[in-house]
């Protein structure tokens, strides 16, 4: 499906969320002691008195102009709320996916080289555990022991890179591990099976029959072939990883979008929740698109001739 | 699970009772796992938390199953417009991570697990829909659904009674995975204080409390964290176990069996018949008493049994047999390429006088491509699809010529391609395998095999995957190169026409043994084994006038249940009781005990004209 209709459908779904609120959002906002006049006034101010279709058209029009509305608290534009906290979230997500890819692919490859051997079993156990460990708990443990007790990493995990690049990177290590472990387990499992399949492929036999050392076969030929199916796994992990990073931010007190989202959820700041959800969905759709492009780059058969 | 049900009985303390004087204690006598910041017993809270966790995961998955599976079946069964609408919904669900949707729902409906987990179950439901739709589409192809429809069952009956039981396996496995995911999402929500009331015992909530007091009591985060991890792990292992059970056997044979097989294997016999005299130099490949075995459930199965062959330079030997006769495995063993877990259990393979069996991987890599090469059946999968053919060709050159500079390697690659008859060789080096036709790709594979100037080439069904017109050309290329380079070629094939066409000598294999060997003329005109004769009779000839083509009755016996005597006896028209008495030796070129009394019909090898 094209991106544009998919984004359109997603935005409709996100817009309609607001209308799941029982009764008037204004009444919910003002609490139990609200007067009918107060509710009416707030509804007018927020544009909630307009018919649904009008509200939707305005919202979509705003989205298209890059305007995601205004927070119900503090009158801050949603786009500003997002852009101010984007850097920590992107840093953490990129850090997490790097951990997931590096750890996951190397573990998967190592396991596939000697199926059934000790290392393969260790990786099997590790991935099963990695899938089960809650990222935020891992964060709590890493922070408590490695940062607070041993002092190997800064206790304050977030330092803007503009202030100190070294500290920014060091602070990101533990949260990235916490965010990336689950993804690394999934990637390791898929890499292992894709690698096993590749190593059994006829072209690997051809390479062996011409006397190519096993090391060269794996490093120069098998990994690139294995990457082709793994790419979509990575893309899918990236989308779940974004959600995980929102929770892990809380553990490491990183001022990212997740913190904004969770605050907004707690006080029912619907425009902010809508805006962030839409941005996440758009990011996920873009990631899938990039994965498709990457697929074409890796796989010559998918390229237009 | 048990703990969750029996929580009130098991828990040593009321999960809500506080004892501030005993707050933040470590594990010990009264409180096995210690107490939290309000002095509440951690073990008791953990046990009650299990109820929340397991209830949430069960509920979520149950709702998702109830909604998703019927939708998927419906989409598959109705297809068309309904299917498209449902699939669009799936795309939307795909682009919003489950946890983020749960956040959004809580923002709208207020904190609480029920509404959030319902939202999560909607996302799961979408994935169940995808899974059950795919499964149903697969099942629908199967005949029994048609049969059911014909016999007048209603649509609903077909969907629920017939299809669903067949899809249960994958759905159950997926459910165990989702139970874990649901539990993790529940824990995350509780951890963030968006789930249950903070005072109520839930693992996520306990963790959140533990975090704040971690400095005073570092043990506090461990029990709830481990509880979550172990429960999700249990779900996942359950899923893995179910999947393995449903898939039947594990795919990879155990190491134990391989070791067992290895113990059986012997080093090559030093006494392997040495060949002397002027003949010796001309023999490029010499196989003596080669046996290859595979460990299986029923024991060790020998798939190549005591095979001996000699191939001279400039000679093409046809290795003929039905699939499963062991001809390919013989070829692979010549390069030390018997696939795991198979093993060479006896015999010797010498290439240019050098022993293959028992050689180290480094020694083998020198031999492979340098002294002996192999080309495989389907050229389109014999080349890495994501690398250019130039890359693969230069790899083959460099494997045996380490000091060549880049431009010399390039020139050699062009020369090799031209040698196998590929036009515009220099530009084609930059092409990928899929840009070649089957015949051209097979020429590339041959060029790669020749890069290290081997003296032996094993060609495993090199023309089987090609269409008839290109088969001819590829055979010509092989025959031409054999003459020009003075190579010994082993042509593995099931096609006697190909043998008549291109080979000088032929060896016929049946059930792992060579049953007859001789020159092509001998074998075709005067076959001495009934199997060879039967094979020849089954070849369509332009001369052979009318009637149906004869076939060989019966089938090749399974390698783990071979007849005691002659392996062909059960299918042989000429069998006598003696044939079943004991193993038959390969005597003067045939493995038939009645060789001398039988006069078997042959045929004239029809040579197609060289193009």
Image (spheres, coloured by chain):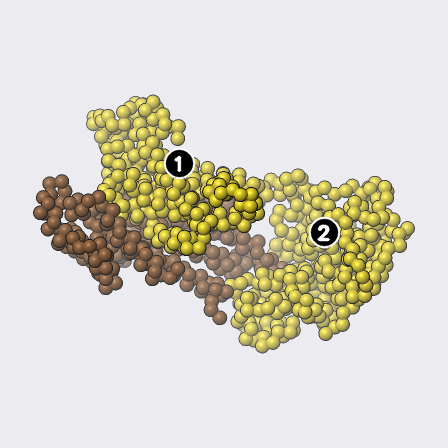
Which chain does the numbered disc 1 sit on? B
Task: Answer with left or right where residue A94 lies relative to residue B490.
Answer: left
The residue beneath circle 2 is B325
Q: Residue at x 62, y 47 (%)?
A: B341
Residue placed at 36% from the left, 29% from the top? Answer: B4
Secondary structure under badge 2? loop
Residue A95 locus on image (x, y percent): 34, 54
Residue under the image location 34 percent in, 47 percent down = B98
Relative depth, front residue between B377 and B356: B377
Quarter holding the N terminus of chain A is bottom left
Residue A241 picture location, percent across and down: 35, 50
Give the brown chain's letter. A
Is the Cβ of the residue at disc 1 closer than 8 Å to that at disc 2?
A: no
Q: Tell me the colour chain B is drawn in.
A: yellow
**Which is more N-terminal, label 2 or label 1?**
1
> What kind of element bears circle 1?
helix
Q: Residue furthest right?
A: B597
Q: Residues within 10 Å of mark 1 (few under 14, many from 20)?
A: some
Q: Which mark is residue B230?
A: 1
Q: Give the side of residue B155 with respect to residue A155, left or right.
A: right
For the residues marked 1 and 2, what is the alpha-carbon distance in whole angstroms?
50 Å
Report whether residue A28 is seen: yes
Q: Residue at x 52, y 47 (%)?
A: B139
């Amino acid at each position: 499906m094209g991106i544009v209709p998919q984004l359109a459908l997603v935005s409709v779904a996100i817009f309609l969320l607001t209308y799941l609120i029982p009764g008037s959002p204004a009444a919910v906002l003002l609490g139990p002691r609200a007067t009918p006049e107060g509710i009416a006034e707030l509804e007018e101010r927020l544009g909630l008195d307009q018919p649904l279709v009008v509200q939707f058209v305005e919202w979509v029009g705003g989205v298209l102009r890059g305007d995601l509305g205004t927070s119900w608290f503090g009158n801050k534009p949603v786009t500003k709320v997002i852009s101010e906290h984007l850097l920590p979230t992107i840093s953490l997500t990129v850090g997490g996916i790097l951990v997931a890819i590096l750890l996951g692919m190397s573990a998967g490859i190592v396991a596939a080289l000697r199926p059934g051997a000790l290392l393969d079993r260790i990786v099997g156990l590790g991935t099963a555990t990695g899938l089960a460990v809650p990222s935020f708990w891992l964060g709590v443990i890493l922070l408590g022991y490695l940062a607070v007790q041993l002092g190997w990493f800064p206790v304050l995990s977030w330092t803007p890179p503009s202030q100190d690049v070294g500290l920014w990177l060091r602070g990101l290590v533990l949260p990235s591990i916490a965010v990336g472990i689950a993804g690394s387990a999934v990637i390791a499992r898929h890499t292992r099976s894709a690698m096993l399949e590749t190593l059994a492929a006829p072209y690997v036999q051809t390479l062996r029959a011409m006397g190519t050392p096993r090391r060269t076969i794996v490093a120069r030929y098998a990994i690139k072939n294995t990457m082709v199916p793994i790419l979509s796994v990575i893309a899918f992990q990236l989308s779940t990883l974004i959600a995980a990073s929102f929770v892990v931010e809380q553990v490491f007190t990183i001022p990212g979008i997740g913190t904004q989202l969770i605050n907004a959820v707690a006080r029912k700041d619907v425009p902010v929740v809508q805006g962030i959800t839409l941005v996440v969905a758009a990011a996920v759709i873009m990631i899938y698109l990039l994965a498709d492009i990457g697929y074409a780059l890796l796989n010559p058969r998918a390229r237009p001739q | 699970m048990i703990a969750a049900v029996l929580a009130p009985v098991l828990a040593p303390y009321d999960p809500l009772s506080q004892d501030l004087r005993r707050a933040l204690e470590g594990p010990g006598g009264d409180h096995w796992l210690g107490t939290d910041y309000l002095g509440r017993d951690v073990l008791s809270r953990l046990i009650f938390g299990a109820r929340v966790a397991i209830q949430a995961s069960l509920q979520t998955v149950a709702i998702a199953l109830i909604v998703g599976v019927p939708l998927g079946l419906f989409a598959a069964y109705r297809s068309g417009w309904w299917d498209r609408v449902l699939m669009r919904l799936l795309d939307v669900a795909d682009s919003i991570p489950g946890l983020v949707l749960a956040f959004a729902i809580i923002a709208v409906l207020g904190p609480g697990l029920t509404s959030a987990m319902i939202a999560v179950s909607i996302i799961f439901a979408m994935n169940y829909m995808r899974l059950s739709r795919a499964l149903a589409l697969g099942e629908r192809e199967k005949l029994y659904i048609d049969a059911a429809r014909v016999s007048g069952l209603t649509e609903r009956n077909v969907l629920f009674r017939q299809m669903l039981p067949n899809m249960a396996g994958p759905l159950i496995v997926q459910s165990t995975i989702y139970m874990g995911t649901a539990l993790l999402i529940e824990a995350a929500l509780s951890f963030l204080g968006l789930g249950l009331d903070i005072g109520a015992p839930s693992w996520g909530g306990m963790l959140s409390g533990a975090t704040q007091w971690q400095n005073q009591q570092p043990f506090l985060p461990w029990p709830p964290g481990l509880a979550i991890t172990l429960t999700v792990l249990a779900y996942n292992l359950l899923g893995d176990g179910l999947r393995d059970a449903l898939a039947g056997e594990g795919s990879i044979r155990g190491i134990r069996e391989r070791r067992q097989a290895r113990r059986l294997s012997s080093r090559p016999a030093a006494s392997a018949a040495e060949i002397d005299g002027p003949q010796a130099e001309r023999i490029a490949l010499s196989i003596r008493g080669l046996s290859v075995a595979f460990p299986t459930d029923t024991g060790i199965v020998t798939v190549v049994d005591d095979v001996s062959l000699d191939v001279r330079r400039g000679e093409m030997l046809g290795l003929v047999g039905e699939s499963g006769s062991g001809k390919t495995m013989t070829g692979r063993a010549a390069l030390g390429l018997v696939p795991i877990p198979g093993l060479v259990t006896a015999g010797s393979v010498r290439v240019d006088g050098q022993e293959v069996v028992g050689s180290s991987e480094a020694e083998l890599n020198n031999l492979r491509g340098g002294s002996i090469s192999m080309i495989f059946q389907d050229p389109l999968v014999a080349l890495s699809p994501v690398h250019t053919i130039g890359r693969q060709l230069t790899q083959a050159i460099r494997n045996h010529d380490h000091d060549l500079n880049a431009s010399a390697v390039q020139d050699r690659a062009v020369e090799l391609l031209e040698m196998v008859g590929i036009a515009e060789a220099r530009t084609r080096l930059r092409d990928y395998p899929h840009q070649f036709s089957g015949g051209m790709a097979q020429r590339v594979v041959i060029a790669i095999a020749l890069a290290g100037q081997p003296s032996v080439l094993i060609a495993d069904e090199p023309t089987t995957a090609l269409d008839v017109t290109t088969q001819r050309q590829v055979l010509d290329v092989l025959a031409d190169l054999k003459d020009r380079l003075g190579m010994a070629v082993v042509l593995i094939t099931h096609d006697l026409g190909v043998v008549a066409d291109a080979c000088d000598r032929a060896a016929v294999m049946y059930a792992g043994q060579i049953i007859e060997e001789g020159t092509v003329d001998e074998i075709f005109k005067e076959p001495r084994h009934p199997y060879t004769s039967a094979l020849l009779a089954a070849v369509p000839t332009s001369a052979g006038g009318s009637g149906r083509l004869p076939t060989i009755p019966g089938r090749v016996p399974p390698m783990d249940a071979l007849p005691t005597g002659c392996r062909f006896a059960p299918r042989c028209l000429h069998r006598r009781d003696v044939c079943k008495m004991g193993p038959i030796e390969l005597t003067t070129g045939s493995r038939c005990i009645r060789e001398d009394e039988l006069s078997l019909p042959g045929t004239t090898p029809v040579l197609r004209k060289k193009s």
